[in-house]
Image (cartoon, grey):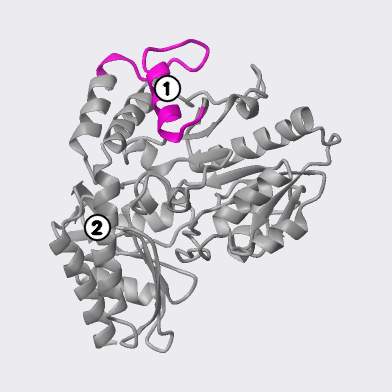
Amino acid sequence: MSTSAELIEVSERRSAHNYHPLPVVIHEAHGAWVTDVEGKRYLDCLSGYSSLNFGHGNPKIIEAAQEQLKNLTLTSRAFYHDQFAQFCAGLGDLTGKDMILPMNTGAEAVETAIKVARKWGYEVKGVAPEQANIIVMEDNFHGRTTTIISFSTDPDAHDGFGPYTPGFRIVRYGSAEAIREAIDDNTVAVLVEPIQGEAGVLVPPDGYLTEVRRICTENNVLMIADEIQSGLGRTGRTFACDHENVVPDVYILGKALGGGVVPVSAIAADEDVLGVIKPGQHGSTFGGNPLACAVGIAVIDILNTGEFQARAARLGEVLHARLRELAGKGVVAVRGRGLWAGVDIDPALGTGREVSKALMARGVLAKDTHGSTIRLAPPIVISEEDLVWAVEQLAAVLEDL
């Protein structure tokens, strides 16, 4: 097995079809570029859904991983290890929170936030046992575990996997009033993506997050911000909530926290929230492992310089200005913030997947979502010239269509 065709054929035959990848087989990658097994290069404009904010093979992150691999990779949390304290303290300082609870995947972090919110509701707020509810948004995407898909409004993620976990109230995204109307004495949290990535990079109205914060404070309800895709530099600030100077009670982090090297996730909150978790009540064998912590420390160091946040903001202006020029030329709408964009293609021209395949033929890798929408989220290390070239390829594809 050496050619793309051979590798794809075996992959399709021997693996479950829970993904529908573009027909490209990547062999190596550096910075913003990847190379397939035949040697063709592509500009990566997806970044592993923001997992690769700092680029493929970022030297600082790779060096940290290699050094840690020589020493210690796993102890489990049955023991302390010498990377754990610095990781928790560093991420706590970055988020401005007292405590960190590390896990592995984004979905695990969301599940952790849900458990913590419920326990906080019972032990601190005084909600009656088994009565806690959490307000969530339409078109949300927080992962694909059984509990999380229980409150998904995406039929592909939701349908056919019941019975479902109760305790969630779904309201319209972007409507603070809908949240206010849904809250009752048993509400323990509002779970929100500051920008909805999977839904098509949907940016809520100005002031929405500020109102969510106010409503949560007034009603003694935790505001939980899922910054797994939007956080850690992607939008031009450390967190997407920073654009409204909003500080949630709980940050949910993942993807870029692992630098594209290992799965690393965490929730960050103050002691009055995370202090409700006691030994034996939550955990993971690999959560907070030495390798993950070493990589996470390198990521935190990178973010502490502010360089990547500033770069995402500057290149984001270039990206959105260029995309807006395509309005009426095959593009119906453009949304996003920083180096992150959702582009609605005129359905009369083709689907998002068809456009993504045409882009792939021109050397640009992107991802479709919800019919005729494509998402662009290149690594923040991308050069301005390469970014402009990618948009030019999109313009050429639309013209061909």
Q: Quadrant of the C terminus?
A: bottom left
Question: Residue under circle 2?
Answer: 314
**Is 5 situated above or below 66?**
below
Residue 128 vertical placement versus 358 (above, below): above
Compared across the picture, whether 347 is left or right of 271 comes to left
Count of marks overlaid on the render: 2
Q: Count neighbours of disc 2 (C-alpha within 10 A) and say few if under 14, some if 14 to 19, many if 20 or more.
A: some
Question: Observer-nearest residue: 349 or 92?
Answer: 92
Q: Is residue 263 visible?
A: yes
Mark 1 or mark 2: whose residue is earlier in sequence:
1
For the residues labelled 1 and 2, the Cα–Cα distance comes to 30 Å
Q: Is residue 76 magenta?
A: yes
Residue 89 numbered mark, or none = 1
Relative image position of residue 204 (x, y in whole percent): 52, 63
Indicate the amino acid at tag 1.
Ala
* Residue shown at 41% from the left, 43% from the top: 255
Q: Nearer the viewer, residue 284 or 11?
A: 284
Label 1 Cα neighbours within 10 Å, binned few <14 / some 14-19 / many ≥20: some
Q: Residue at x 21, y 60 (%)?
A: 43
| Residue at 48 percent of width and 65 percent of height | 202
Q: Amino acid at mark 2?
A: Arg
- Which residue sits furthest right? 128
The dot on residue 50 is none
Where residue 49 appears, as percent x and y from the top left, is 39, 53
Q: Which residues are magenta?
A: 70-97
Residue 193's spot in the image, x, y percent? 53, 53
Query: Would residue 143 be found to the left or right of residue 254 on screen?
Result: right
Task: Please check the rendered image and state whether residue 335 is part of the magenta-colored stretch, yes or no.
Answer: no
Give the residue furthest to the top.
Answer: 79
Q: Nearer the viewer, residue 84 or 218?
A: 218
* Image point (30%, 69%), residue name: 320
